[in-house]
Image (cartoon, helix red, strand yellow):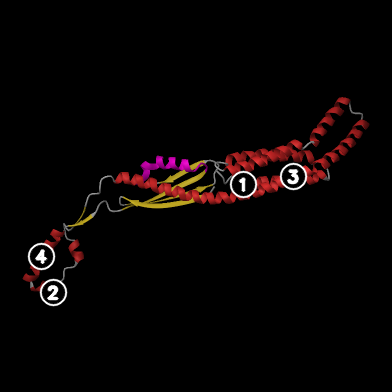
Amino acid sequence: MTGYGAARGEAAGVALRLRVRSLNHRFLDLQLRLPAELEALQPAFEQALRGAIHRGRVELTATFERAPAGRVVINREIAAAYVEAFRELQREFRELRQTELEPAEVLRLPGIVSVAAPEAGAGGQLQALAEAVLRDCLADHTRMREREGAAIAEDLRRRLRTMAASVRAIGELRQQFAEAFAARLRARFAQWLADALPPERLAAEAALLVERSNISEELARLEAHLAEFGHILDQGGEAGKKLDFLLQELNREVNTLLSKTASVAGEGLAITSHGLTLKAEAEKLREQVQNLE
């Protein structure tokens, strides 16, 4: 399932922004892009991602901005000494009496500006900041995936209703199909008797045709698969792989049903039409299921 999440935080003179993007993928594939300052936290980031996302290609990108290494300090005593020295020169030299001393010029003088050492414990604050921002980022990502998941689930349920209607329609045609198949069987028997088939061959052919005329088991399994599909959707959680397997079983039953009914005109053709609807909807379900965890 696709998703996107972003979050930002500041602490200890650092601004950190994380972005998580997930794309459809059969398995979990993590790709982390971290600045050098956060490389030591990569195992912790991967563990958090695996706990929140179980399927998909996941990209985590971090941007990192560090403030100056410490606090800027202005030495006012030295600045005052420079200003006093300048005033003395103005009193001594007439040429300087109309000159003004600009603040920017004072700040560039040696010893005026210095940088205090950074406070202890910044490393621990950075780790705490990264963990907090990642939690917010994953929460944002999860909200987007939940909205998309709800829309996909509604589409899946709509297709399930279409498939259930086709299965019911086939069930209503089953008796008429059995009668048409019986008529075909009687015609085949007459032909075999005319051809003087050996009794054992006649019994084998008859048994095969009788078996092929019964689609009750396929209908029962289709109904069970559709009900289980809806049950898994209602449960939520990690459903993608379960639904993918269930669709393979459902498609197998449809293929068997179509192979049994393809040789009978009339009701057989009507059943084939509904069977093709089942196959088309199952394929659309399979495409959507690839978007689920």
Determine whether 200 is above or below 31 in the image.
above
User: Which label sits in the foreground, 3 or 4?
Assistant: 3
Give the amino acid at mark 2.
Answer: Gln
Instruction: Report the predominant secondary structure element of the magenta stretch.
Output: helix
- Could you tell me how far apart the alpha carbons at marks 4 and 2 are, in whole angstroms? 16 Å
Q: Is residue 266 left or right of residue 64?
A: right
The residue that label 2 is drawn on is 98
Q: Residues within 10 Å of mark 1 (few under 14, many from 20)?
A: few
The residue that label 3 is drawn on is 168
- Could you tell me how far apart the alpha carbons at marks 4 and 1 are, in whole angstroms? 81 Å
Q: Where is residue 88? Give x, y as percent.
A: 8, 67
Residue 224 or 271: which is nearer the viewer?
224
Q: SS class of the residue under badge 3?
A: helix
> Sequence-wise, which precedes: disc 1 or disc 2?
2
> Sequence-wise, which precedes: disc 3 or disc 4?
4
Q: Residue at x 36, y 41 (%)?
A: 40
Give the amino acid at mark 3.
Answer: Arg
The magenta span reads: 35-55
The residue that label 1 is drawn on is 287
Q: Residue furthest right?
A: 194
